[in-house]
Image (cartoon, helix red, strand yellow):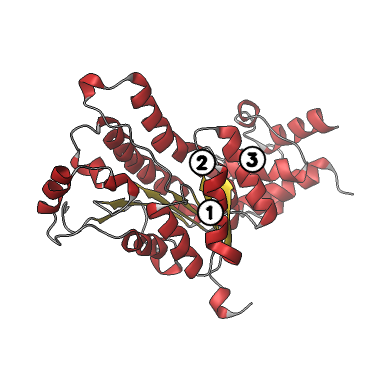
């Protein structure tokens, strides 16, 4: 195997059909990994498949369903090898003011954004432990740190992901597995295009760099955390937000 | 073909990074062989693979010594 391939692993990216997840899948493929990207629909999976060409594959996955998660990880392991790089990116929003928020809106966001971390990370952890090498990156949000009116469910799920990340980093550190968060701010994706002009202008006024971020700018940081060079970074949250929130 | 006892002891030695002769039958994984909680989970995973079986979590928690591991395998596979 050539030196260029020495770092090549199988990478699993959830929610990879568009936006930040799609950019992450591309960045990891460019780094030499074999990338399996997941989408909730057949059409989404087919798009990923076409998009990645011979550098990976698209698969259907419902991160809310443990049986679906276990079946996918097994199928990926059989076909490509065990995923030792995992990017938990799949997420949803169901925005509402708390006093109007339905229980279903709360539950859906917590289960998809936070419950999925439990299911997918657990399904991948065994092989990483055995390999004595692993990278888990959880995509959270600046909202998990700052809060945002109308997103109590989303903010709670993302802040919860931070706690999960730090606990798992301690659990698996002895096995040379790093677990980190990347917290994007206001990135130009379908999710942020849903915002109104007023909301958009108000957000831009809070960003020192004066613009939205690009999905590729988030993906580059994720690719770094998945690399050998990032071997000593664990339990950390890297904020990618143009300066709108500084810690 | 080595006995179940020999196979279990070999896996314990490999997983916990101790010499096979240190792995006596009465040894406790945590107290005598220096295993941490993650080591014991991995040990059970290795036993599952060696003996091609699935050990339920509630059973796995009870396997804390070399003897208990040997007994479990004997009872469930013999």
Instruction: Specify the subunit that label 3 lies on.
Output: A
Mark number displayed over residue A196: none
Q: Is residue A98 above or below residue B29?
A: above
- Taking the spot 54% from the left edge, 78% from the top edge, the residue there is A4
- Crowding at dot 3, Cα within 10 Å, few <14 / some 14-19 / many 20+, comes out as few
Q: Which residue, given by chain and number where applicable, does mark 2 sit on?
A: A40
Mark number displayed over residue A47: 1
Q: Can I make out residue B34 in this image?
A: no
**Depth-wise, is mark 1 or mark 2 nearer the camera?**
1
Mark number displayed over residue A71: 3
Residue A227 is situated, as x and y percent measured from the top left of the image, at 44, 66
Residue A245 is situated, as x and y percent measured from the top left of the image, at 16, 51
Q: Do marks 1 and 3 both belong to one polypeptide chain?
A: yes
Helix, strand or loop for disc 3: helix
Helix, strand or loop for disc 1: helix
Is B66 on the left or on the right of B2, as rendered? left
């Amino acid at each position: 195997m050539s030196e260029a391939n020495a770092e090549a692993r199988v990478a699993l990216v959830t929610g990879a059909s568009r936006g930040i997840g799609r950019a992450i899948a591309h960045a990891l493929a460019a780094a030499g990994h074999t990338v399996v990207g997941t989408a909730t629909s057949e059409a989404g999976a087919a798009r990923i498949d076409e998009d990645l060409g011979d550098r990976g594959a698209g698969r259907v996955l419902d991160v809310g369903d443990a049986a679906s998660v276990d079946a996918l990880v097994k199928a990926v392991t059989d076909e490509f090898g065990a995923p030792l790089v995992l990017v938990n990116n799949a997420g949803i929003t169901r925005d509402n003011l708390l006093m109007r928020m339905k229980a279903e809106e709360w539950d859906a966001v917590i289960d998809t954004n936070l419950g999925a971390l439990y299911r997918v990370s657990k399904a991948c952890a065994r092989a990483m432990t055995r390999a004595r090498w692993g990278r888990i990156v959880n995509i959270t949000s600046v909202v998990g740190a700052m809060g945002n009116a109308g997103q109590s469910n989303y903010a709670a799920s993302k802040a919860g992901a931070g706690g999960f990340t730090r606990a798992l980093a301690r659990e698996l550190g002895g096995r040379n597995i790093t677990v980190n968060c990347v917290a994007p701010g206001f990135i130009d994706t379908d999710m942020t295009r849903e915002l109104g002009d007023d909301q958009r202008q108000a957000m831009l006024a809070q960003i020192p760099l004066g613009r939205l971020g690009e999905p590729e700018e988030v993906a580059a940081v994720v690719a770094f955390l998945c690399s050998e060079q990032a071997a000593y970074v664990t339990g950390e949250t890297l904020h990618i937000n143009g300066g709108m929130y500084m810690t | 073909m080595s006995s179940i006892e020999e196979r279990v002891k070999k896996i314990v030695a490999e997983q916990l990074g101790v010499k096979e002769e240190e792995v006596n039958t009465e040894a406790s994984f945590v107290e005598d062989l220096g295993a941490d909680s993650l080591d014991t989970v991995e040990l059970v995973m290795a036993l599952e693979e060696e003996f091609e079986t699935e050990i339920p979590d509630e059973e796995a928690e009870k396997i804390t010594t070399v003897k208990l591991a040997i007994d479990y395998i004997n009872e469930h596979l013999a």
